[in-house]
Amino acid sequence: MTEAVRNPRLHALGAASIELAEIVGGMGVLLARILVRIHKFDGEELVKNLYKMAVKSLPIVAVTALFTGAIMVIQAAVIVKRFNAEGLLGWGAGFGTLREIAPLLTALMISGRVGANNTAELGTMVVTEQIDALRVLAIDPIAFLIVPRFIAILATLVMMTLFADALALFGAAYTGQGLLGVEPMTFFNGLTGGLLDFGDVFNGLFKSFVFALVMALASCHFGLATKGGAPGVGRAVNASVVASAAGIFVLDYLVSFLG
């Protein structure tokens, strides 16, 4: 009897490691297949996905961003009042918002809405044999379906992060006026007074690009790997959301540490 059989925990750890390696390897192979076909994408499919992913995500991103900015001010209110540091409110709220909170929360919202929906659509196409039908018609499903969705998710998250940055700062400025009596002009002067620069904005945008990369690969990978009919679609969506969220937090740590 082997050590793995005698030790169930070791067996479970080995199985989990193999499963993780299969997922990461599958996503890597999918990325290579996408990059080979990146110039062959279907333009109409790209426009349709941009509308579905970006335009229709505007309301939920707007609400999330406004309340994110307000929450940042509420958290800073105690320190601002204690030290009479109204002039630093813009920097305090802006630094955390631009570099961390807006990219992270926007990615999680887009993952729940766009990533899960993308996995469900692709999984349904797989179990209903629509992907096989495309191959029968000599249509490459990667170029026709996956590449436009991949590009659309990358563009959506970067654009939504910029949108969220602006609205979060707007919400923070007017929450500061309502709660602390800090005029919006004072808030924005603190934001642009030299303590923050384009590097902070770029850091957040780079994070959003990295988050979008893992989200797009995870949603497409689990969608194409769907098995087992309708229950399999549900399992694929669940796996996609979990993998995307875990990847987002891991990459957030790495990018923050290296940056």
Image: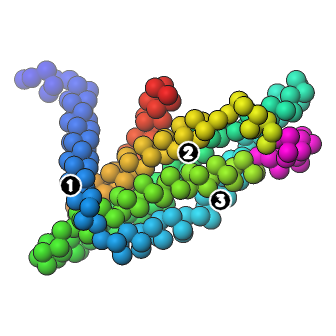
Span highlighted in magenta in the image: 172-187
Q: Is residue 5 left or right of residue 115?
A: left
Q: Nearer the viewer, residue 46 or 12?
A: 46
Q: CA distance from mark 3 to mark 2?
A: 13 Å
At x 76%, y 46%, the residue is 172
Q: Quarter of the image holding residue 91?
A: top right
Q: Which amino acid, by three-letter code, is at mark 1?
A: Val
Q: Is residue 92 above or below residue 55?
A: above
**Picture coordinates of residue 48, whole percent (x, y):** 42, 73
Q: Which mark is residue 102?
A: none
Q: Which quadrant of the view contains residue 62?
A: bottom right
Residue at position x 54%, y 69% in the image: 56
Which callout, 1 or 3, points at the residue further toward the start of the chain?
Answer: 1
Q: Earlier in the sequence, mark 1 or mark 2?
A: 1
Residue 231 seen anywhere in this rendered image of the structure: no
1 or 2: mark nearer the eye: 1
Can residue 56 be seen here? yes
Q: What residue is disc 1 on?
A: 36
Characterize the local packing of mark 1: few (<14), some (14-19) or many (20 or more) Cα atoms within 10 angstroms.
Answer: few
**Which residue position is annotated with label 3?**
62
